[in-house]
Image: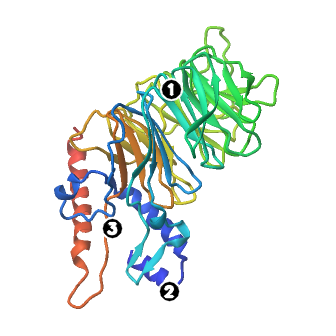
Amino acid sequence: MQSLLLDGFLSRISPKELLRIETEASYNELSLISDDSLNTATRNVKFSQGFKFDVHPHKNSISCLDLETMNSQFLLSGSTDSSLKLWNIRLLQEKKRTDDYQWQGFYHFKREHLQSVTNLVSVPRKTIHDFGISHLQWWPFDPGMFVTGSYDHSVKVFDTENFEQVFSFDLKNKVYNFDINATGQHVLVGVASESPMVKLLDLRTTSDSHILKGHKSTVLSVKWSPTDSNVIATGDILGKINMWDIRRSKSCVCELDQYNTTGNPNPSTSPVETVKAHQGAVNGIQFNELGSKLVSCGLDEKIRSWDLTQPGGVNELLNFGPLIRNKSHQYKKFILSPSTETDLQFLLFPNDNGELLVYRLANGKLVKRLTKGNKVNLKLNSIVYTGFSSATYITGDSKGNLDVWGPQSEYEIHQSEGETGCGEGSNVLDDINDELIARKKMKTNPF
Protein backbone atom coordinates (compact mmCIF):
# COMPACT_ATOMS: atom_id res chain seq x y z
CA MET A 1 0.00 0.00 0.00
CA GLN A 2 2.85 2.37 0.86
CA SER A 3 4.46 1.81 -2.54
CA LEU A 4 1.15 2.52 -4.30
CA LEU A 5 0.72 5.77 -2.41
CA LEU A 6 4.29 6.74 -3.24
CA ASP A 7 3.72 5.96 -6.93
CA GLY A 8 0.62 8.12 -6.86
CA PHE A 9 2.40 10.97 -5.12
CA LEU A 10 5.22 10.83 -7.68
CA SER A 11 2.70 10.60 -10.57
CA ARG A 12 3.97 7.18 -11.62
CA ILE A 13 0.36 6.05 -11.73
CA SER A 14 -2.65 8.24 -12.40
CA PRO A 15 -5.23 9.12 -9.73
CA LYS A 16 -7.81 7.21 -11.76
CA GLU A 17 -5.68 4.06 -11.68
CA LEU A 18 -5.21 4.44 -7.93
CA LEU A 19 -8.97 4.87 -7.59
CA ARG A 20 -9.45 1.66 -9.58
CA ILE A 21 -7.12 -0.23 -7.25
CA GLU A 22 -8.78 1.20 -4.15
CA THR A 23 -12.27 0.41 -5.46
CA GLU A 24 -11.33 -3.22 -6.06
CA ALA A 25 -9.86 -3.46 -2.56
CA SER A 26 -13.11 -2.00 -1.17
CA TYR A 27 -15.02 -5.14 -2.16
CA ASN A 28 -13.05 -7.03 0.49
CA GLU A 29 -14.30 -4.53 3.10
CA LEU A 30 -18.02 -4.55 2.26
CA SER A 31 -20.43 -4.52 5.18
CA LEU A 32 -23.91 -3.38 6.15
CA ILE A 33 -23.53 0.35 6.78
CA SER A 34 -27.12 1.58 7.13
CA ASP A 35 -27.68 0.20 10.63
CA ASP A 36 -26.72 2.66 13.39
CA SER A 37 -26.41 -0.16 15.94
CA LEU A 38 -23.30 -1.36 14.14
CA ASN A 39 -21.39 1.76 15.15
CA THR A 40 -21.56 0.88 18.85
CA ALA A 41 -21.03 -2.83 18.27
CA THR A 42 -17.69 -2.31 16.52
CA ARG A 43 -15.91 0.57 18.21
CA ASN A 44 -12.56 -0.10 16.53
CA VAL A 45 -14.01 0.34 13.06
CA LYS A 46 -14.50 3.75 11.52
CA PHE A 47 -17.51 3.64 9.25
CA SER A 48 -17.08 5.80 6.19
CA GLN A 49 -20.79 6.46 5.78
CA GLY A 50 -23.79 6.90 8.07
CA PHE A 51 -27.08 6.51 6.26
CA LYS A 52 -30.36 7.89 7.50
CA PHE A 53 -33.74 7.15 5.96
CA ASP A 54 -36.16 9.96 6.70
CA VAL A 55 -39.17 7.59 6.54
CA HIS A 56 -39.60 3.82 6.72
CA PRO A 57 -39.35 2.62 3.10
CA HIS A 58 -42.36 0.26 2.79
CA LYS A 59 -44.86 -1.52 5.02
CA ASN A 60 -44.64 -4.70 2.94
CA SER A 61 -42.00 -6.54 0.96
CA ILE A 62 -39.92 -4.53 -1.52
CA SER A 63 -40.14 -6.42 -4.79
CA CYS A 64 -38.07 -4.21 -7.10
CA LEU A 65 -35.55 -1.36 -7.18
CA ASP A 66 -34.02 0.74 -9.93
CA LEU A 67 -31.58 3.65 -9.87
CA GLU A 68 -31.36 5.99 -12.84
CA THR A 69 -27.91 5.92 -14.40
CA MET A 70 -27.66 9.50 -15.71
CA ASN A 71 -26.76 10.95 -12.30
CA SER A 72 -27.18 7.90 -10.01
CA GLN A 73 -29.37 10.08 -7.82
CA PHE A 74 -33.02 9.01 -8.01
CA LEU A 75 -34.07 5.60 -6.73
CA LEU A 76 -37.44 3.93 -7.37
CA SER A 77 -38.74 1.24 -5.03
CA GLY A 78 -41.84 -0.88 -5.65
CA SER A 79 -43.66 -3.11 -3.19
CA THR A 80 -45.81 -6.22 -3.29
CA ASP A 81 -48.67 -4.12 -1.88
CA SER A 82 -48.53 -1.95 -5.09
CA SER A 83 -47.08 1.11 -3.33
CA LEU A 84 -44.21 3.00 -4.96
CA LYS A 85 -41.66 5.52 -3.66
CA LEU A 86 -39.11 7.86 -5.20
CA TRP A 87 -35.90 8.57 -3.26
CA ASN A 88 -33.07 11.06 -3.58
CA ILE A 89 -29.95 9.16 -2.52
CA ARG A 90 -27.51 11.97 -3.18
CA LEU A 91 -28.39 15.57 -2.40
CA LEU A 92 -27.46 17.90 -5.25
CA GLN A 93 -25.14 20.04 -3.18
CA GLU A 94 -23.29 16.94 -1.96
CA LYS A 95 -23.08 15.13 -5.29
CA LYS A 96 -19.62 14.52 -6.72
CA ARG A 97 -18.79 12.95 -10.04
CA THR A 98 -16.05 10.35 -10.43
CA ASP A 99 -13.74 12.99 -11.91
CA ASP A 100 -13.97 14.99 -8.69
CA TYR A 101 -12.08 12.58 -6.44
CA GLN A 102 -9.37 14.29 -4.44
CA TRP A 103 -5.92 13.66 -3.10
CA GLN A 104 -5.89 14.33 0.65
CA GLY A 105 -2.17 14.92 1.09
CA PHE A 106 0.34 12.10 0.79
CA TYR A 107 -1.29 9.40 2.84
CA HIS A 108 -4.99 9.49 2.21
CA PHE A 109 -7.04 9.15 -0.92
CA LYS A 110 -10.64 10.20 -0.39
CA ARG A 111 -13.78 9.52 -2.41
CA GLU A 112 -17.14 11.18 -1.97
CA HIS A 113 -19.73 8.85 -0.43
CA LEU A 114 -23.48 8.93 -0.17
CA GLN A 115 -24.73 10.91 2.78
CA SER A 116 -28.50 10.66 2.94
CA VAL A 117 -31.55 8.98 1.49
CA THR A 118 -34.55 11.30 1.24
CA ASN A 119 -38.07 10.33 0.25
CA LEU A 120 -39.41 12.63 -2.48
CA VAL A 121 -42.68 10.97 -3.53
CA SER A 122 -44.83 8.28 -1.90
CA VAL A 123 -47.56 6.62 -3.94
CA PRO A 124 -50.02 4.69 -1.71
CA ARG A 125 -51.08 1.14 -2.46
CA LYS A 126 -53.87 0.53 -5.01
CA THR A 127 -53.16 3.92 -6.62
CA ILE A 128 -51.26 3.09 -9.80
CA HIS A 129 -51.65 -0.71 -9.75
CA ASP A 130 -54.30 -3.03 -8.33
CA PHE A 131 -51.79 -5.71 -7.34
CA GLY A 132 -48.11 -5.88 -6.47
CA ILE A 133 -45.45 -4.20 -8.59
CA SER A 134 -43.25 -6.97 -10.00
CA HIS A 135 -40.70 -4.80 -11.81
CA LEU A 136 -39.88 -1.17 -12.56
CA GLN A 137 -37.25 0.56 -14.66
CA TRP A 138 -36.12 4.06 -15.53
CA TRP A 139 -36.06 5.18 -19.13
CA PRO A 140 -32.35 4.59 -19.93
CA PHE A 141 -31.72 7.98 -21.55
CA ASP A 142 -33.71 10.37 -19.37
CA PRO A 143 -34.97 10.12 -15.75
CA GLY A 144 -38.06 12.04 -16.83
CA MET A 145 -39.88 8.77 -17.52
CA PHE A 146 -40.12 5.33 -15.94
CA VAL A 147 -42.03 2.09 -16.58
CA THR A 148 -43.70 -0.33 -14.15
CA GLY A 149 -45.03 -3.87 -14.48
CA SER A 150 -47.52 -5.57 -12.18
CA TYR A 151 -49.36 -8.76 -11.37
CA ASP A 152 -52.53 -6.90 -12.43
CA HIS A 153 -51.55 -7.76 -16.06
CA SER A 154 -50.39 -4.25 -16.95
CA VAL A 155 -47.23 -2.43 -17.99
CA LYS A 156 -47.52 1.33 -17.42
CA VAL A 157 -45.47 4.33 -18.51
CA PHE A 158 -45.19 7.33 -16.15
CA ASP A 159 -44.00 10.93 -16.35
CA THR A 160 -41.60 11.49 -13.44
CA GLU A 161 -42.20 15.24 -13.10
CA ASN A 162 -45.85 14.94 -12.10
CA PHE A 163 -46.04 11.18 -11.50
CA GLU A 164 -48.90 10.81 -13.95
CA GLN A 165 -49.59 7.79 -16.11
CA VAL A 166 -48.81 8.37 -19.80
CA PHE A 167 -49.89 5.02 -21.23
CA SER A 168 -50.90 1.54 -20.10
CA PHE A 169 -50.46 -1.80 -21.89
CA ASP A 170 -52.85 -4.65 -21.04
CA LEU A 171 -50.89 -7.92 -21.28
CA LYS A 172 -53.81 -10.12 -20.10
CA ASN A 173 -51.30 -12.11 -18.01
CA LYS A 174 -49.28 -11.54 -14.85
CA VAL A 175 -46.15 -9.55 -15.63
CA TYR A 176 -43.03 -10.94 -13.93
CA ASN A 177 -40.30 -8.92 -15.60
CA PHE A 178 -39.57 -6.57 -18.50
CA ASP A 179 -36.52 -4.85 -19.94
CA ILE A 180 -36.13 -1.65 -21.96
CA ASN A 181 -33.66 -1.73 -24.82
CA ALA A 182 -30.83 0.63 -23.87
CA THR A 183 -28.87 0.74 -27.13
CA GLY A 184 -30.90 3.66 -28.52
CA GLN A 185 -31.61 1.88 -31.82
CA HIS A 186 -35.29 1.36 -30.98
CA VAL A 187 -37.69 1.77 -28.05
CA LEU A 188 -38.91 -1.80 -27.59
CA VAL A 189 -39.72 -3.26 -24.19
CA GLY A 190 -39.43 -7.05 -23.84
CA VAL A 191 -41.98 -8.48 -21.39
CA ALA A 192 -41.80 -11.78 -19.47
CA SER A 193 -45.23 -12.84 -18.29
CA GLU A 194 -47.41 -15.79 -17.35
CA SER A 195 -47.79 -16.43 -21.07
CA PRO A 196 -45.16 -18.52 -22.92
CA MET A 197 -45.08 -15.81 -25.59
CA VAL A 198 -42.66 -12.92 -25.10
CA LYS A 199 -44.24 -9.63 -26.14
CA LEU A 200 -42.27 -6.67 -27.46
CA LEU A 201 -43.95 -3.35 -26.65
CA ASP A 202 -43.16 -0.37 -28.85
CA LEU A 203 -43.23 2.80 -26.74
CA ARG A 204 -43.13 5.00 -29.83
CA THR A 205 -46.27 3.56 -31.49
CA THR A 206 -47.79 1.95 -28.34
CA SER A 207 -48.07 -1.29 -30.32
CA ASP A 208 -47.78 -4.74 -28.71
CA SER A 209 -48.14 -6.84 -31.84
CA HIS A 210 -44.57 -8.22 -32.03
CA ILE A 211 -44.46 -11.64 -30.33
CA LEU A 212 -41.60 -14.11 -29.82
CA LYS A 213 -42.83 -17.71 -29.86
CA GLY A 214 -40.66 -20.55 -28.59
CA HIS A 215 -41.24 -21.09 -24.89
CA LYS A 216 -43.80 -23.62 -23.69
CA SER A 217 -44.36 -22.23 -20.21
CA THR A 218 -44.34 -19.08 -18.07
CA VAL A 219 -41.44 -16.72 -18.76
CA LEU A 220 -39.88 -15.22 -15.62
CA SER A 221 -36.93 -13.18 -16.89
CA VAL A 222 -35.93 -11.14 -19.93
CA LYS A 223 -32.87 -9.06 -20.84
CA TRP A 224 -31.73 -7.14 -23.93
CA SER A 225 -28.13 -7.33 -25.07
CA PRO A 226 -26.34 -4.08 -24.13
CA THR A 227 -24.44 -4.00 -27.45
CA ASP A 228 -26.77 -5.56 -30.05
CA SER A 229 -30.21 -3.98 -30.26
CA ASN A 230 -31.66 -7.06 -31.97
CA VAL A 231 -30.59 -9.70 -29.44
CA ILE A 232 -32.66 -10.54 -26.38
CA ALA A 233 -32.46 -13.38 -23.84
CA THR A 234 -35.37 -14.93 -21.93
CA GLY A 235 -35.65 -17.56 -19.18
CA ASP A 236 -38.71 -19.65 -18.35
CA ILE A 237 -40.15 -21.75 -15.56
CA LEU A 238 -38.94 -25.02 -17.13
CA GLY A 239 -35.28 -24.02 -16.89
CA LYS A 240 -34.82 -22.96 -20.52
CA ILE A 241 -32.93 -19.88 -21.71
CA ASN A 242 -33.66 -18.77 -25.27
CA MET A 243 -31.54 -16.35 -27.28
CA TRP A 244 -33.51 -14.37 -29.88
CA ASP A 245 -32.73 -12.24 -32.92
CA ILE A 246 -35.86 -10.17 -33.48
CA ARG A 247 -34.98 -9.55 -37.16
CA ARG A 248 -35.40 -13.19 -38.13
CA SER A 249 -38.64 -14.91 -39.04
CA LYS A 250 -37.62 -17.78 -36.77
CA SER A 251 -36.47 -15.50 -33.99
CA CYS A 252 -35.05 -18.09 -31.58
CA VAL A 253 -31.35 -18.36 -32.43
CA CYS A 254 -30.41 -20.98 -29.84
CA GLU A 255 -31.32 -22.54 -26.50
CA LEU A 256 -28.56 -22.56 -23.91
CA ASP A 257 -27.61 -26.08 -22.82
CA GLN A 258 -26.03 -26.71 -19.42
CA TYR A 259 -24.16 -29.69 -20.92
CA ASN A 260 -22.65 -27.69 -23.78
CA THR A 261 -19.16 -27.02 -22.43
CA THR A 262 -17.14 -27.23 -25.66
CA GLY A 263 -18.91 -25.04 -28.19
CA ASN A 264 -20.21 -28.05 -30.15
CA PRO A 265 -23.78 -28.57 -28.92
CA ASN A 266 -25.25 -32.00 -29.59
CA PRO A 267 -28.94 -31.71 -30.50
CA SER A 268 -31.29 -33.96 -28.55
CA THR A 269 -32.28 -37.05 -30.51
CA SER A 270 -35.25 -38.04 -28.35
CA PRO A 271 -38.46 -36.00 -28.72
CA VAL A 272 -38.95 -36.24 -24.96
CA GLU A 273 -35.62 -34.63 -24.11
CA THR A 274 -35.34 -30.88 -23.98
CA VAL A 275 -32.30 -28.65 -23.73
CA LYS A 276 -32.14 -26.86 -20.37
CA ALA A 277 -29.90 -24.23 -18.88
CA HIS A 278 -31.01 -24.99 -15.31
CA GLN A 279 -32.78 -27.83 -13.52
CA GLY A 280 -35.25 -25.31 -12.12
CA ALA A 281 -37.00 -22.16 -13.26
CA VAL A 282 -34.70 -19.41 -14.57
CA ASN A 283 -35.67 -16.27 -12.64
CA GLY A 284 -32.67 -14.03 -13.30
CA ILE A 285 -30.36 -13.20 -16.23
CA GLN A 286 -27.76 -10.47 -16.78
CA PHE A 287 -25.39 -9.61 -19.64
CA ASN A 288 -21.92 -8.22 -19.07
CA GLU A 289 -21.23 -4.80 -20.59
CA LEU A 290 -19.76 -6.21 -23.80
CA GLY A 291 -22.66 -8.59 -24.38
CA SER A 292 -20.16 -11.44 -24.67
CA LYS A 293 -21.23 -13.18 -21.48
CA LEU A 294 -24.57 -14.05 -19.91
CA VAL A 295 -25.02 -14.91 -16.23
CA SER A 296 -28.15 -16.73 -15.08
CA CYS A 297 -29.65 -17.96 -11.81
CA GLY A 298 -32.34 -20.56 -11.27
CA LEU A 299 -34.48 -22.28 -8.69
CA ASP A 300 -32.00 -25.17 -8.75
CA GLU A 301 -29.98 -22.71 -6.63
CA LYS A 302 -27.22 -22.48 -9.21
CA ILE A 303 -25.54 -19.53 -10.90
CA ARG A 304 -24.19 -20.21 -14.38
CA SER A 305 -21.93 -18.14 -16.60
CA TRP A 306 -22.26 -18.50 -20.38
CA ASP A 307 -19.72 -17.60 -23.05
CA LEU A 308 -21.77 -16.20 -25.95
CA THR A 309 -18.80 -15.79 -28.28
CA GLN A 310 -18.85 -19.53 -29.01
CA PRO A 311 -21.55 -21.40 -31.00
CA GLY A 312 -24.68 -22.16 -29.02
CA GLY A 313 -23.42 -20.41 -25.88
CA VAL A 314 -20.96 -22.38 -23.74
CA ASN A 315 -21.41 -23.19 -20.06
CA GLU A 316 -18.17 -21.99 -18.43
CA LEU A 317 -18.60 -24.50 -15.57
CA LEU A 318 -17.94 -21.99 -12.81
CA ASN A 319 -18.75 -23.23 -9.33
CA PHE A 320 -20.31 -20.51 -7.18
CA GLY A 321 -20.64 -22.84 -4.19
CA PRO A 322 -23.51 -24.16 -2.04
CA LEU A 323 -24.60 -20.94 -0.31
CA ILE A 324 -27.12 -19.75 -2.92
CA ARG A 325 -30.73 -19.69 -1.73
CA ASN A 326 -33.25 -19.02 -4.50
CA LYS A 327 -36.67 -20.66 -4.33
CA SER A 328 -39.22 -18.00 -5.34
CA HIS A 329 -41.08 -17.95 -8.66
CA GLN A 330 -40.44 -14.26 -9.19
CA TYR A 331 -37.75 -12.26 -10.91
CA LYS A 332 -34.45 -12.18 -9.00
CA LYS A 333 -32.35 -9.09 -9.69
CA PHE A 334 -28.68 -9.74 -9.02
CA ILE A 335 -25.98 -7.40 -10.31
CA LEU A 336 -22.54 -7.32 -11.91
CA SER A 337 -20.13 -4.62 -10.77
CA PRO A 338 -18.99 -2.18 -13.50
CA SER A 339 -16.00 -3.72 -15.29
CA THR A 340 -14.54 -0.26 -15.87
CA GLU A 341 -14.12 0.40 -12.14
CA THR A 342 -12.06 -2.67 -11.17
CA ASP A 343 -9.67 -5.12 -12.81
CA LEU A 344 -11.72 -8.05 -11.51
CA GLN A 345 -15.49 -7.97 -11.99
CA PHE A 346 -17.75 -8.96 -9.10
CA LEU A 347 -21.20 -10.54 -8.93
CA LEU A 348 -23.47 -9.57 -6.03
CA PHE A 349 -26.36 -11.94 -5.32
CA PRO A 350 -29.19 -11.04 -2.88
CA ASN A 351 -29.99 -14.31 -1.14
CA ASP A 352 -33.39 -15.58 -0.01
CA ASN A 353 -32.05 -15.98 3.55
CA GLY A 354 -31.09 -12.31 3.84
CA GLU A 355 -27.42 -12.67 2.97
CA LEU A 356 -25.64 -10.68 0.29
CA LEU A 357 -23.11 -12.91 -1.49
CA VAL A 358 -20.18 -11.31 -3.32
CA TYR A 359 -18.36 -13.45 -5.92
CA ARG A 360 -15.54 -12.96 -8.38
CA LEU A 361 -17.14 -13.41 -11.77
CA ALA A 362 -13.97 -14.79 -13.37
CA ASN A 363 -13.79 -17.92 -11.21
CA GLY A 364 -16.90 -18.00 -9.00
CA LYS A 365 -14.86 -17.55 -5.81
CA LEU A 366 -16.77 -16.21 -2.81
CA VAL A 367 -15.26 -12.89 -1.70
CA LYS A 368 -17.74 -11.84 0.99
CA ARG A 369 -20.74 -13.37 2.75
CA LEU A 370 -22.59 -10.41 4.21
CA THR A 371 -25.37 -10.70 6.78
CA LYS A 372 -27.74 -8.34 8.57
CA GLY A 373 -26.78 -9.43 12.07
CA ASN A 374 -29.75 -10.74 14.00
CA LYS A 375 -32.16 -9.88 11.17
CA VAL A 376 -31.94 -13.29 9.55
CA ASN A 377 -34.33 -14.81 7.03
CA LEU A 378 -35.34 -11.41 5.67
CA LYS A 379 -35.30 -12.31 1.99
CA LEU A 380 -33.43 -9.88 -0.26
CA ASN A 381 -35.35 -9.32 -3.49
CA SER A 382 -33.48 -6.67 -5.46
CA ILE A 383 -30.24 -4.72 -5.59
CA VAL A 384 -28.88 -1.56 -7.27
CA TYR A 385 -25.42 0.01 -7.50
CA THR A 386 -24.98 3.64 -6.46
CA GLY A 387 -22.20 4.36 -8.96
CA PHE A 388 -19.13 6.63 -9.00
CA SER A 389 -16.62 3.95 -7.88
CA SER A 390 -18.31 3.92 -4.47
CA ALA A 391 -18.54 0.10 -4.19
CA THR A 392 -21.84 0.82 -2.42
CA TYR A 393 -25.09 -1.07 -3.03
CA ILE A 394 -28.70 -0.79 -1.89
CA THR A 395 -30.98 -3.81 -1.38
CA GLY A 396 -34.68 -4.23 -0.59
CA ASP A 397 -35.97 -7.01 1.66
CA SER A 398 -39.18 -8.86 2.51
CA LYS A 399 -39.97 -6.55 5.47
CA GLY A 400 -39.94 -3.37 3.41
CA ASN A 401 -36.44 -2.26 4.47
CA LEU A 402 -33.84 -0.59 2.29
CA ASP A 403 -30.32 -1.57 3.34
CA VAL A 404 -27.04 -0.01 2.25
CA TRP A 405 -23.87 -2.07 1.86
CA GLY A 406 -20.48 -0.48 1.31
CA PRO A 407 -16.81 -0.38 2.33
CA GLN A 408 -16.64 -1.16 6.02
CA SER A 409 -13.83 1.13 7.00
CA GLU A 410 -11.15 3.49 5.82
CA TYR A 411 -7.73 2.80 7.27
CA GLU A 412 -5.83 6.09 7.28
CA ILE A 413 -2.11 6.50 7.80
CA HIS A 414 -1.38 9.77 9.54
CA GLN A 415 1.89 11.64 9.57
CA SER A 416 2.29 13.71 12.69
CA GLU A 417 4.70 14.24 15.59
CA GLY A 418 5.04 11.24 17.86
CA GLU A 419 2.76 9.07 15.70
CA THR A 420 4.30 5.86 14.39
CA GLY A 421 1.43 4.96 12.08
CA CYS A 422 1.01 1.52 13.67
CA GLY A 423 -2.28 2.15 15.43
CA GLU A 424 -4.67 1.49 12.56
CA GLY A 425 -2.22 -0.77 10.74
CA SER A 426 -2.04 -3.17 13.69
CA ASN A 427 -5.76 -3.80 13.27
CA VAL A 428 -5.15 -4.90 9.71
CA LEU A 429 -2.33 -7.24 10.79
CA ASP A 430 -4.53 -8.68 13.52
CA ASP A 431 -7.26 -9.35 10.99
CA ILE A 432 -4.81 -11.13 8.68
CA ASN A 433 -3.50 -13.23 11.59
CA ASP A 434 -7.03 -14.15 12.68
CA GLU A 435 -7.87 -15.18 9.13
CA LEU A 436 -4.79 -17.47 8.94
CA ILE A 437 -5.71 -19.09 12.26
CA ALA A 438 -9.30 -19.61 11.09
CA ARG A 439 -8.12 -21.26 7.88
CA LYS A 440 -5.90 -23.67 9.84
CA LYS A 441 -8.88 -24.62 11.99
CA MET A 442 -11.00 -25.19 8.88
CA LYS A 443 -8.41 -27.63 7.50
CA THR A 444 -8.52 -29.75 10.66
CA ASN A 445 -12.28 -29.45 11.22
CA PRO A 446 -14.22 -28.14 8.19
CA PHE A 447 -17.53 -28.33 10.11
- Under circle 1, the secondary element is loop
Q: Is residue 280 above or below residue 49?
A: above
Identify the coloring: rainbow
Where's residue 382, x and y in %? 44, 38
Residue found 71% across the figure and 18% down from its top: 213
Q: Which residue is mark 2?
A: 10
Where's residue 290, x and y in %? 66, 49
Q: How far apart are the alpha carbons under marks 2 and 3?
A: 22 Å
Q: Which residue is mark 3?
A: 410
- Under circle 2, the secondary element is loop
In primary-sequence order, the first of circles 1 and 3 is 1
In primary-sequence order, the first of circles 2 and 3 is 2
Do we see residue 312 in this rendering? yes
Q: Residue furthest bottom?
A: 417
**Does 240 sit left or right of 385 as displayed?**
right
From the viewer's side, name the closer residue of 180 and 170: 170
Type of amino acid at the residue the image marks with label 1: His
Q: Is residue 11 above or below residue 372?
A: below
Q: Residues within 10 Å of mark 3 (few under 14, many from 20)?
A: some
Q: How far apart are the alpha carbons under marks 1 and 3?
A: 44 Å
- Under circle 3, the secondary element is loop
Q: Which residue is mark 1?
A: 129
Where's residue 297, x and y in %? 49, 32
